[in-house]
Structure formats: C-alpha cells, structure tokens
Amino acid sequence: MTDPIFTADHHGFYRLGEPFFPVDGSNITIIRLPAHLCDDLDWLQQIEQASQIVTSGKSILWEIDLGLSHFQFTPENSAAFFSYSLALEEFTAKIWPLFRDHTFGATLYRGVLPKSECFPYAHWETAFADWSADIKYPCYAIYCAQMLSEYLHRLISFLPDSLLPFAFLDVTDILSPAKTVQLLSKTRFEHLQLAVKGTKFPFSGLCWNDGQPVSIQTTPSPPLGIYLPDDSHIDPLFLEQLDQFIPTQNSFRIIPEEKLTEQWDGLDLLFIDPRIISPQGRRKLLGFIAAGGTIETLERVPLKFS
C-alpha cells in the first residue's frame, strides 16, 4: 500500500509531509457527487470536471451528497444505510483509483447538527436513557450529535483508509460557544475532519463560510489550550464559565481529556476547571506539568497539582 498524499493531525493538514493550507478556489475545488437514495450514481460529468481540475494543478474535495442533512434517522432504517454504503463503494471503485493522488478528501455531510426532527425521540428514548445513565446532566442535543458521529463513522469504513473524511457542520444557531465545543469534541468526531460554519475558531483547522466553503486558519498553532472534560463530568457551571472565557481568546486549541497526552505538544498553558477533573484526567495533567506545561483556571488563577 502506498503512503497517503494528504494527511492531518491536531496541528493541521499536510501534503506529502509538508504543511498544506486548503482554500476553495485557490488550491482545491469541491466537486459534488449526487448520491441521494433516488440518484443513479452516474458521475461521468463529475469525472470530466475532475480531470480538468487536475490539469489546472488543483486538488479535489469530493462532496458525496447522501442527503443526510434531511434524513430521518431511526434504528429500523437499515435499508437506507445499505444504499449509502453502495454509493461509497462505487466512489471507492470508480473515482478513487482515477484521482487518488489529487484528492484532498471527501465529505459525507453538510448541514446543521441534527436535532429531534432527525432523531425522533420516540424512536430513541430507550437508547438515550441507556447512553445517559452515567451522565449527570443529560442533553438530547448531545446525544443526537453522538448518533450522527457514530453513523458517519460507520459510513467512512467503506471509504479508502488513506482518504481524509470530512463533515461540514453549521453551528450558526448554537448561541453558546461552550456548547459548540462540547458538541464538536474530537472525542466524539474522532476520525472525521470538521469544517465548521458559525464560529470564529476552527475545528481541524477548517472553517466553512458562504462565499468560501473551505478556508484555513494559516496562523501557527496557539501555545494555549482548553481542557475539555468527558460529557459525564461537564456541568452547567463549566459551560457558563467557558462561555465567558472563549470570547476573551483569539486562538486556542480544544483538547478533550481522552486526547490530552497525544495533543499537548506545543502548548505552554492549559486552562481547566479543577472541580470536574476525573482521576484519569488528573494523572494526565500531572504529566503535562512534568513536561513543562502550566495550568490555570478559567478565571486565570494559576494552579499547582501534587
């Protein structure tokens, strides 16, 4: 198996190991592949368009439009999933071999985070109760985001391993920056690159705007981060404090507790809420301090762990 051309980590994107800053219309072009349940998967026109783009020296971000932003998810709807998997297998068989070296990635979702109309509560009540059993402040919107993530992660298993998978998420209607951070946690969307519309700070380095669907924040990774506890430890006070804190920062890295050890590189300062640190998180924070890092509360009070 050959090495992938495009890769990504918590710092950004790379082309053949060198930093890559994707900007739609400049060095990448988005091509939509219609793949709704009623589409015939005839993509000859898109293949011709892609050939012209490759000739111009640009890379391609495929938008495999499954229509999921208007889909009603129910536990019984396995036939639709089978149809979507066939569309992704068709992409893998007919598109990927032709344009592998010129493909930046593929997105399977563009739209708002699904709510109860997409995940009807009557169908998911029992599953939601099981999921939230250990969560002190359960939230159905968080559960819907979790279910979307799990659905997308199942779908990307039908794509080539070396292809970067994306989701374009519109969070314009979410007024709380803290809730946005929790909803889009990298723990939740672990294997997806997120392009986010409606927030001034990027997730996975990408933002999605009306005039420019994909743009990159080209500034270096910030030397400070915000520690995000697991859903079971997040409470309203933490969200309230984070809502007040985020607008005071120009740039920062959100690091979920689970990812702390692997993503603290380059950070000098980490902001935490000491009230809601798990025993596992405490051990990881001690490791961050031992590595030369400093921690403060969201009120900018220095902390010392022992």
Image: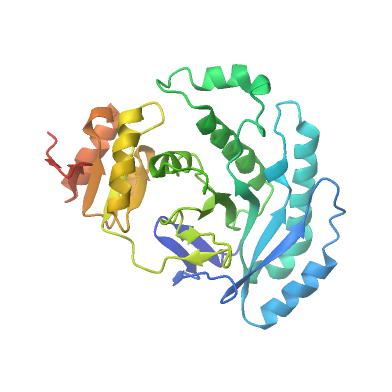
Along the horizontal axis of the image, is 127 left or right of 34?
left
Residue drawn at (38%, 41%) of the image:
178
Task: Name the residue nearer the viewer: 126 or 78.
Answer: 126
Quarter where residue 82 is shown:
top right
In the displayed structure image, the side of residue 139 where residue 149 appears, left or right: right
Left or right? Give the position of 51 relative to 285. Answer: right
Q: Can you give x and y, in whole percent of width and height, for residue 19 in the image?
A: 43, 70
Quadrant of res 235: top left
State the residue lying farthest toward the bottom: 56
In the depicted structure, whether residue 82 falls above or below residue 161:
above
Q: Is residue 137 left or right of residue 144?
A: left
Could you tell me residue 67's position as x and y percent? 73, 47
Looking at the picture, does residue 18 appear above or below residue 292?
below
Vertical side of 54 occupied by 17: above or below:
above
**As rendered, which of 190 and 218 lies closer to the eye?**
218
> Do we see residue 235 in this rendering?
no
- Count how many numbered circles sit on residues in the image: 0
Query: Residue 30 appears at what percent x and percent y?
Result: 65, 66
Q: Which residue lies at the image location 29% right of the left edge and 34% below the top edge? A: 281
Where the C terminus falls, by quadrant?
A: top left
* Residue 61 point in image, percent of width and height: 63, 64
Identity of the residue drawn at 57% across and 57% down = 164
Q: Nearer the viewer, residue 86 or 46?
A: 46
Could you tell me if residue 237 is visible in this image? Answer: yes
Instruction: Say which quadrant the N terminus sits in.
Output: bottom right
The chosen color scheme is: rainbow
